[in-house]
Image (tube, rainbow, N blue to C red):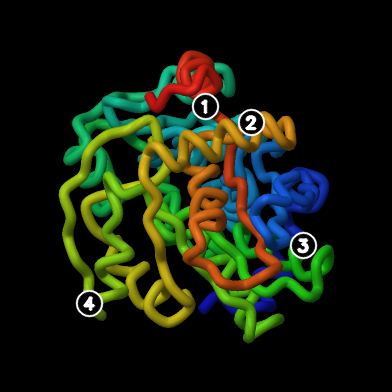
């Protein structure tokens, strides 16, 4: 668990750099319960990742990053790191999986960083080894570094302030840094609040791992839900998931596309697939609480993908 003092210190460190995002009610009375949206898609980079990146940079010495910074990311963490590197005036290199969406690649370049495409397995290797052959720079992990998780945990502070009687929170599960940060804060502030992880069924290792009580490996199929999903869990994240989460649930690609469409139609909120997974799970009936917060983790969805979804298709 990330100490509450570290999360509170992270809030001080990122104040003025990161938006305190609104918490709004989902305009969908048909759900039969109160569902709220924590709109991290409104952050300057369109994703919660800016919280962890800003806090991580606040915790390093300038001399540690003079040669540049390096990370592995499918897109949103890349933008967070690129944003922080640009603010610090140091170069950033991002190793991205080959299927990374164009919208996120364009944003990386717009923020002044460079990216290197790699096959998924090689990209995952970079994530676990924290290095990439031929590239210099201090590696910032998108998930495992505690300052990153503490930065993510500032979301929990805001939820409790805005909705003190929250009963459950649903968090998209990618690598686990977002869920761990939020769950750490909530476990110390509101121990009775349920914390549910949301996965996409095409790449969902957490749900079977929690069911079995041990880390499981699954097959992975690429989909438009690019911000979450893998073949297995990062070893460091498994104890956090096991000890902090109430449960994990999967949503189909079609259910997530439907949630993306619903958010646009009812709340005029643009969410990427990973972000809409929390809403899809909240609407599935798997979360029994009557007052639920869904973390809308980002809004960086390709325009063509969004067009298809709004036309009633499932990309």
Q: Is residue 310 left or right of residue 16?
A: left
The answer, for residue 34, to whether it is visible in the render is: yes
Q: Nearer the viewer, mark 3 or mark 4?
A: 4
In the picture, measured across the screen, residue 23 lies left or right of residue 153, that is right
- Spatial CA span between label 2 and label 4: 35 Å
As drawn, the label of residue 158 is 3
Q: CA distance from mark 1 to mark 2?
A: 8 Å
Quadrant for residue 225, please give it: top left
- Callout 4 secondary element: helix
Question: How far apart are the alpha carbons under marks 3 and 4?
Answer: 33 Å
Query: Mark number for residue 56?
Result: none
Q: Nearer the viewer, residue 207 or 86?
A: 207
**In 3D space, how far apart are the residues under numbered discs 4 and 1 (Cα atoms)?**
33 Å
Q: Secondary structure at mark 1?
A: loop
x and y, in percent, of residue 237 in the image = 36, 68
Check if mark 1's residue and mark 2's residue have beta carbons within 8 Å. Answer: yes
**Residue named by callout 2:** 270
**Residue to which mark 4 is pinned:** 212
Left or right of residue 132: residue 4: right
Q: Earlier in the sequence, mark 3 or mark 2?
A: 3
How far apart, in angstroms, are the residues tagged by discs 3 and 1? Answer: 25 Å
Within 10 Å of disc 2 (Cα), the crowding (few <14, some 14-19, many 20+) is: many
Comparing 260 with 21, the one in front is 260
Indicate which disc, 1 or 2, sits on the residue closer to the N terminus.
2
Q: Which mark is residue 301?
A: 1
């Amino acid at each position: 668990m990330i100490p509450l003092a570290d999360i509170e210190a992270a809030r001080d460190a990122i104040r003025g750099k990161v938006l305190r995002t609104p918490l709004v009610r989902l305009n969908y009375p048909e759900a039969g319960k109160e569902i709220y949206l924590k709109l991290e898609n409104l952050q300057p980079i369109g994703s919660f990742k800016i919280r962890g990146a800003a806090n991580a940079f606040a915790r390093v010495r300038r001399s540690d990053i003079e040669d540049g910074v390096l990370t592995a990311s499918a897109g949103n963490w890349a933008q967070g790191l690129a944003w922080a590197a640009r603010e610090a005036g140091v170069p950033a290199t991002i190793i991205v999986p080959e299927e990374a969406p164009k919208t996120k690649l364009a944003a990386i370049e717009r923020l002044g960083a460079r990216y290197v495409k790699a096959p998924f397995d090689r990209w995952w290797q970079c994530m676990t080894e924290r290095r990439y052959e031929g590239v210099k720079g201090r590696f910032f992990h998108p998930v495992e570094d505690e300052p990153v998780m503490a930065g993510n945990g500032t979301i929990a502070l805001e939820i409790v302030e805005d909705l003190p009687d929250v009963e459950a929170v649903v968090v998209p599960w990618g690598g686990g840094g977002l869920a761990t940060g939020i769950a750490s804060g909530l476990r110390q502030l509101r121990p009775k609040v349920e914390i549910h992880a949301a996965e996409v069924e095409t790449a969902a290792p957490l749900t079977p791992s929690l069911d079995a009580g041990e880390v499981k490996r699954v097959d992975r199929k690429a989909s438009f839900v690019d911000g979450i999903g893998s073949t297995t869990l990062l070893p460091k994240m498994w104890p956090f998931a096991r000890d902090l989460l109430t449960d994990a649930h999967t949503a189909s690609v079609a259910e997530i596309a439907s949630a993306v469409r619903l958010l646009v139609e009812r709340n005029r909120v643009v969410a990427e697939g990973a972000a809409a997974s929390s809403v899809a799970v909240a609407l599935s009936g798997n979360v029994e609480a009557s007052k639920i917060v869904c973390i809308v983790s980002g809004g960086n969805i390709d325009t063509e993908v969004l067009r298809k979804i709004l036309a009633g298709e499932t990309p």
